Image (cartoon, rainbow, N blue to C red):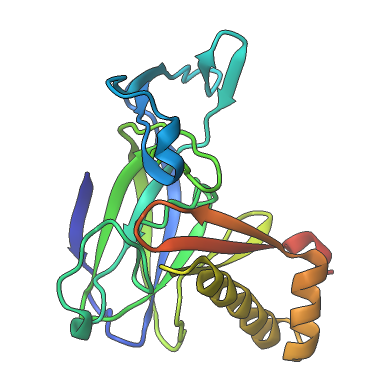
Amino acid sequence: MLTGPVFVTGAEPGDALEVKVLSIDLPIAYGYNGCSGFIRENCIAGRGPTILRLDRKNMTSEFLPGIVIPLRPFFGSMGVAPPLAVGRVSSNPPSTHAGNLDNKELVAGTTLWIPVHVTGALFEIGDGHAAQGDGEVDQTAIETSLRGRVQLTVRKGMTLMWPRAETDTHFISMGTDVDLTVATRVAIQEMVDFLAATKKMDKHQAYQLTSLAGDVAITQLVDGTMGVHVKMPKSIFK
């Protein structure tokens, strides 16, 4: 379920929309996980979704006796309208307009920047997740209701090709494509370009640093276009 679109006054194509995730709360004490996705032959036919209780005090969920999952709630989908030339799209596959990124790093305290493609940006948010692993391999996280607060700011002159994020500890670049190799190349190149533009190094050095200190992760494998992100620790920059 998505909320939006929200018309952002002043946002025009070529701008970036800054989304600060101020807070995320769990209004209900349960969620569910289905079984489908990347290797669905593991799923037992006829078995329904697994209902999981959410311990909102300790921020955990017991999957099976003795198996406790830490909760890190985030919105699986935050995005804007795609370019007009693309036309009408499904809310499932993420792309340059962000959307259904399913990036587990986008928790409260994170800032996400999204390229703006149409007047007003038309921001949407939703797809609440209480916890998820990188890859989201069975097509679902702990799906649940979320209540959140975000702050939207139009950034003029911040030219982006792809979504980008920053947490307290990392810079994050992203790429998506139906081909996982292409998505990986996009995410790596986005990190190289970011480092070269902001950290006083050339692309040769930025590429080396991405190999030496960056972590490349599969964001998700199940949304039509697959996602990859690169995390660069902020602690290495003195």
Determine the image quadrant of residue 170. Answer: bottom right
Residue 38 or residue 232, whichever sits in front? 38
Q: Is residue 153 visible?
A: yes
Q: Is residue 111 left or right of residue 189?
A: left
- Residue 106 position within the rendered picture, expressed as x and y whole percent measured from the top left: 49, 51
The image shows a total of numbered marks equal to 0
- Residue 145 position within the rendered picture, expressed as x and y whole percent measured from the top left: 30, 33
- Residue found 74% across the figure and 60% down from its top: 233
Determine the image quadrant of residue 88. Answer: bottom left
- Residue found 32% across the figure and 78% down from its top: 116
Q: Is residue 201 visible?
A: no
- Residue 7 position within the rendered picture, expressed as x and y whole percent measured from the top left: 19, 68
Residue 129 or residue 182, whichever sits in front? 182
Q: Is residue 197 left or right of residue 76?
A: right
Above-or-below relation of 8 to 90: below
Q: Is residue 29 left or right of residue 10?
A: right
Instruction: Tell me the quadrant of the picture where the C terminus can be found.
Output: bottom right
Instruction: Tell me the quadrant of the picture where the N terminus can be found.
Output: top left
Q: In the displayed orientation, state which residue is furthest to the left.
A: 88
- Residue 63 position within the rendered picture, expressed as x and y whole percent measured from the top left: 51, 18
Determine the image quadrant of residue 152. Answer: bottom left
- Residue found 65% across the figure and 87% down from its top: 197
Q: In the displayed orientation, state which residue is furthest to the front.
A: 41
Above-or-below relation of 43 to 162: above
Residue 228 or residue 161, whichever sits in front? 228
